[in-house]
Image (tube, coloured by chain):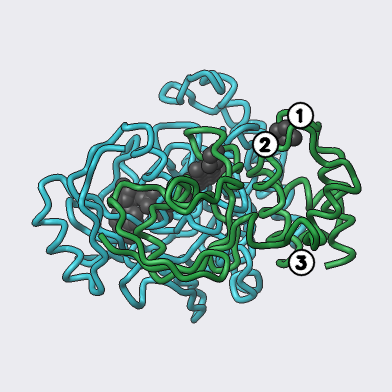
Chain colours: A green, B cyan
Amino acid sequence: MNVEFTVNGTAHTLDVEPNTLLVDVLRSTLGLTGTHVGCDTSQCGACTVHLEGRAVKSCAVLACQVDGGTITTIEGIGTVDDLHPMQEAFRECHALQCGFCTPGMIMSAIDLVERGEAGDEGSVRAGLEGNICRCTGYHNIVRAVLHAAQRM
Amino acid sequence: MYRFNYHRPTSLEEAEQRLDAGEDALFLAGGQTLIPTLNLRLASPSDLIDLAGIDGLSGIDVADEMVRVGAMTRHAEVAASADVQASLPVLADLAGQIGDAQVRNRGTLGGSVANSDPAADYPAAVVALDATVHTTRRTIPGAEFFLSLFETALQPGEIITAVEFRVPKRAAYQKFPNPASRYAVVGVLVAEFDDGVRVGITGAAACAYRSDDLETALNASLAPDAVDAVDIDYDRFNSDLHASAEYRANLVRVMARRAVEALLREG
Ligand SMILES: Cc1cc2nc3c(=O)[nH]c(=O)nc-3n(C[C@H](O)[C@H](O)[C@H](O)COP(=O)(O)OP(=O)(O)OC[C@H]3O[C@@H](n4cnc5c(N)ncnc54)[C@H](O)[C@@H]3O)c2cc1C
Ligand code: FES
Ligand code: FES
């Protein structure tokens, strides 16, 4: 079936099978491989993107559900020369080791800050419950989000 | 994921017709239970009937000691609603404890209630807040809605349109979350109405239920100590890798006590 949606400002019309996940369209059809897949149970958050500005797990959304929708992925928030303040804060605070969870962390964190729910350490930790990191121990991630919240 | 047909009807009538016409069709709401289930190939519906295109299924109305939440209202909307926070703060609090932020941005009240997962949060509110479940065919009293594990009073093809909660004098929800999924290992909602105390328990048994024993004790004395005297019958409690039935019985007592303490703090 045909679906139309906007990804990072570009409109697409695609012919997708109903059983296609949004994350597979982003990665395989559009080549936006910054969005990762870390589990098959919708628990790790590596696949987090923004749908209408809100963080969602793109492995728990069907491509046909977002017909008419607006999506932002990690590729759409900043460039190498002009990083998003959240990306900059992750770099400065050393909030990543292998980097696998980072795109999802950053997309969740931006939504958290934009909702005004990143006021203190406790709310950042609670707000990132849907994102699992296997390397950093979260400490620097939380620092980075608090840091970015000051500048966004 | 197995193959299926996808439909997005724009009216409830069309949705019901689509469901009848499908060989083994299912409704789709927020997809936060259904899509992971399809991903794991634990279900193979012939058709998915997406309820997202139907107007009027989403939204919150506060009136006359009642809070009505449309079936397609997302958990995040209930948690952030100033109206719910003001009129029925326990519901906003409960919705804000469901899963994680991404799940709350997609998951819906109707999907959660229709699913009757034994560890889901909303069912505790449906039974304890004297709710009425509105469907395309009738209204169902909240306390009679959940029948068993993933089993409700809904008939095939019946769609939940809204749930209406009665506003208590005061209420509190306490949950012991599974550390990985945040689902309730046990959750207890205690609500004080003019006509008595209602206690809803989720996580412990096959589905959410009202606890007669705790209600009797708390109607005699609405105090944390009243909970300690109750012998929690765990004969039919779940025993699984997360917790034994005995441990769940203890959690019911601890969560009920904490809920009474929190409720009393409300004044
Ligand atoms: C990682 C993770 C953590 C979670 N943690 C929690 C938690 O802590 N607590 C909790 O309560 N839940 C939790 N959930 C579940 C979440 O709340 C789901 O959103 C909810 O259970 C189902 O709602 P949905 O809108 O996503 O429904 P869907 O997945 O779309 O549908 C679920 C079922 O309900 C049926 N259905 C949907 N809407 C209707 C309707 N209006 N009328 C009739 N039938 C309908 C569907 O046919 C389907 O069988 C979690 C989920 C995930 C992925
Ligand atoms: S890939 Fe793990 S939550 Fe989506
Ligand atoms: S940096 Fe390796 S998983 Fe988070």
Q: Tell me if B115 is positioned left or right of A71 in this view.
A: left
Q: Indicate the position of residue B158 as horizontal and vertical percent values.
A: 21, 58
Which residue lies under the disc numbered 3? A116
Q: Looking at this view, is B89 or A145 the one in front?
A: A145
- Which residue is the site of mark 1? A135
Q: Amino acid at mark 1?
A: Cys
Residue at disc 1, CB closer than 8 Å to ligand 3: yes
Which is more N-terminal, label 1 or label 2?
2
| Residue A71 vs residue B26, the one in the foreground | A71
Task: Establish whether labels 2 and 3 are both on one chain.
Answer: yes
The residue positioned 48% from the left and 48% from the top of the image is: A23
**Upstream in the sequence, badge 1 or badge 3?**
3
Classify mark 2 as within 8 Å of ligand 3 or not, answering yes or no.
Answer: yes
Q: Which mark is residue B225?
A: none
In three-dimensional space, the C-alpha distance between marks 2 and 3, rounded to whole angstroms, equals 26 Å
Q: Is residue A52 above or below residue A48?
A: below
Circle on res. A100: 2
Number of the front mark, 2 or 3: 2
Which residue is the extreme one toward the bottom?
A: B63
Tell me which residue sits at (76%, 62%) in the image.
A113
- Residue at the location (10% across, 47% down)? B23
Q: Earlier in the sequence, mark 2 or mark 3?
A: 2
